[in-house]
Amino acid sequence: MQPHHLELLAPARTFDIGIEAINHGADAVYIGGPSFGARSTADNSVQDISKLVQYAHRFHSRIFVTLNTILRDDELEGARKLAWQMYDAGVDALIIQDMGLLEIDMPPIQLHASTQTDIRTPEKAKFLQDAGLSQIVLARELTLPQISAIRDVIDTERTVIEFFVHGALCVAYSGQCFISHAHTGRSANRGDCSQACRLPYEVKDAQGRIVAHDKHVLSMKDNNQSENLRDLVDAGIRSFKIEGRYKDMAYVKNITAHYRKLFDEVLSERPELAASSHGRTTFNFEPDPNQNFNREFTDYFVQGRKEDIGAFDTPKNPGQPIGWVSKVTAEHVEITTDDPAIELHNGDGLCYYDLQKDLVGLQINRAEAAKAKGVWRLYPKDPMDGFKDLRQGVQVNRNRDMSWVRTLDKKSAERRMGVWMQLAEKDKGLQLTLTDETGHTGSAQMAIAWQEPKDLAQAEEKLKTALTKLGDTLFEPLDVQVVLPRPWFVPPSQLNALRRDAVQALEAARSAGLHRLPRAVPVEPPVAYPEDTLTYLANVFNQKARDFYAKHGVKVIDAAYESQEELGEVSLMITKHCVRFSLSLCPKQAKGVTGVQGTVKAEPMQLINGKEKLTLRFDCKPCEMHVVGKIKKSVLNAVPESPVQFYKSRPVVGLH
């Protein structure tokens, strides 16, 4: 019985970061190509993608390229050409959002459904499987029972279920946020989000009363599913995705290493599971997610709705508590640490909350240990009189540890594959055979005359020692067998050449043993889409995408929001996060509370940031919140990128 493979899927902004993701244990890496990658400043050349593919494939790790923006009609040809370039570069799969790509001449490359396709239901998941998508990433908002329900309708031999386990959280269902386009003309579905969700807002109730002031009520904490991995495996997840194509090298190294160690523990417990790539990774640091930028952590909705999922005070990194202010002078601040073992360094980043609960940063220029243990005298980079409310007793956090940064700047991991080595006589010389842990074999022969060693007793041990010197190859020796009928002396230069040729043969065998992922064949005749009407929420931005849905039985198909046909107030964001719930103003929370029951109603609220005003409407049955607004005149007055109009007048349902 074949084991179920678990895939640790890491992000890469650049080729160099992609290499380190592989080195730190990623089974697969997703990266943007030269365009259409839904991250406007994370593009990479075809040449770099090709080099990354070659490196990853040595470990049988995979490279997935994001082609997940919605496309204008005039961009489809460029996307088609890019897809073929990626295929020729050896890329294993393309991650897509736009269904128009399924209606053009694409290469026989595997296609994966982007998070932007908004997969929340078993019906949607099964449809995408039957339409030809081989891997589908589910909405981050799903609970374990909802994930299991999707697993139950999916053919897991055909389709891999993927889930985000770490990183920044979009507050909206992915693909269902249009605030950025409405306010700035920059489309999140085209990789250029203005991140309105991270802004501070004043929240007013239906009577105009302020219920929250200057709070980041749409800003979520960061996702961290470290405690839920076994439950997610049991629910059917097989690809575990780390968010972060904008993140730096240290983040990718640390978070990939963190989950590699956790998954290796799971694999050691569960013999029916296996990693989807090869090699063991060792680290010269202890991974710690708290060391990277984060807004504190949440496991979001996986274990059900919780009250503490928001980062309402600040969208910045609050860091970890290290101590408190014991003295303030005109030149320096004195810190007493919570643990005397804590060391501070020049260049560390500290922060604290002022009286208004704003996070104030304090970068250390020079750190001096005082005579008293655990007390540090810190000279900030900026003048002391600029630090608001910095006073004795204030708690201090550290959000950048320069010692940690320097550790991650250096080589921090090594990935190797174990091999069994056997040296034997063959014909008129010697044969060295290498067999790796997955059964691949490489051999090399050398015609060489027998020479008697000077030290017969040590001859075999010297050969073994010399053979194990695999240096900077991908391999490390598990065992060496010298199967010779008589003692041999082999000159070092010839033994090195034999070992080098055997390694090359093993690499060639491994390369030949890696097969391209198959492109899924769509079910024929085309299966029906779960709905027969699509609004702007379906993100249909070109005629080929419209043709796709029409082929699958959809009768009415509205154009994407970016076509600027929706001029009135509409839902600019749909989210599972509920401001009412987070502010303890939810009718369900009040249920059964004496004196409160029946007085709390899910009336609309208003979000205000400067001149921007948005309405919050609450749909309590599915427990969702809609952020409602309309497109700005300034956006409408700008020349639209590509007007899309599928109908001169909207057809009557059932007659089209």
Image (cartoon, helix red, strand yellow):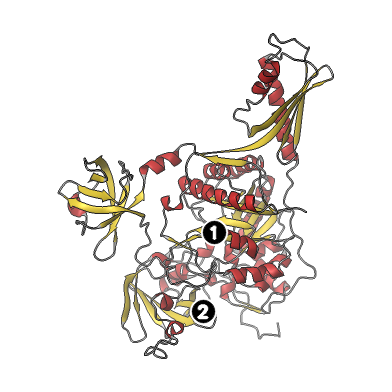
Would residue 642 appear left or right of 422 to someone viewing this image? Answer: left
Residue 497 in view of the camera: yes
Residue at x-position 36% and y-position 46%: 401
Q: Residue 177 got which mark?
A: none
Residue 29 in view of the camera: no
Q: How many marks?
A: 2
Residue pushed farthest right? Answer: 427
Residue pushed farthest front? Answer: 457
Give the class, few, some or many, for how many residues have Cα within 10 Å of label 1's Cα (few <14, many ≥20): many
Would residue 101 appear left or right of 388 to someone viewing this image? Answer: right
Q: Which of 248 and 222 is in front in this view?
A: 222
Report x, y in % for residue 203.
Answer: 35, 77
Q: What element carries label 2?
A: loop
Q: In this view, does 120 lie above or below 498?
A: below
Q: Which of 287 and 567 is in front in this view?
A: 287
Q: Which of 424 and 634 is in front in this view?
A: 424
Residue at x-position 75% and y-position 53%: 2
Q: Are marks 2 and 1 in contact (CB under 8 Å)?
A: no
Query: Mark 2 or mark 1, which has the lower sequence index?
Result: 1
Amino acid beneath label 1: Val
Q: Residue 623 got which mark?
A: 2
Residue at x-position 60% and y-position 49%: 264
Name the residue tied to disc 1: 165
Q: Quadrant of residue 613?
A: bottom left
Report x, y in % for residue 371.
Answer: 21, 40
Give the class, few, some or many, for how many residues have Cα within 10 Å of label 2's Cα (few <14, many ≥20): few
Amino acid beneath label 2: Cys
Would residue 624 appear left or right of 486 to someone viewing this image? Answer: left
Q: Nearer the viewer, residue 600 or 477?
A: 477
Q: What element carries label 1?
A: strand
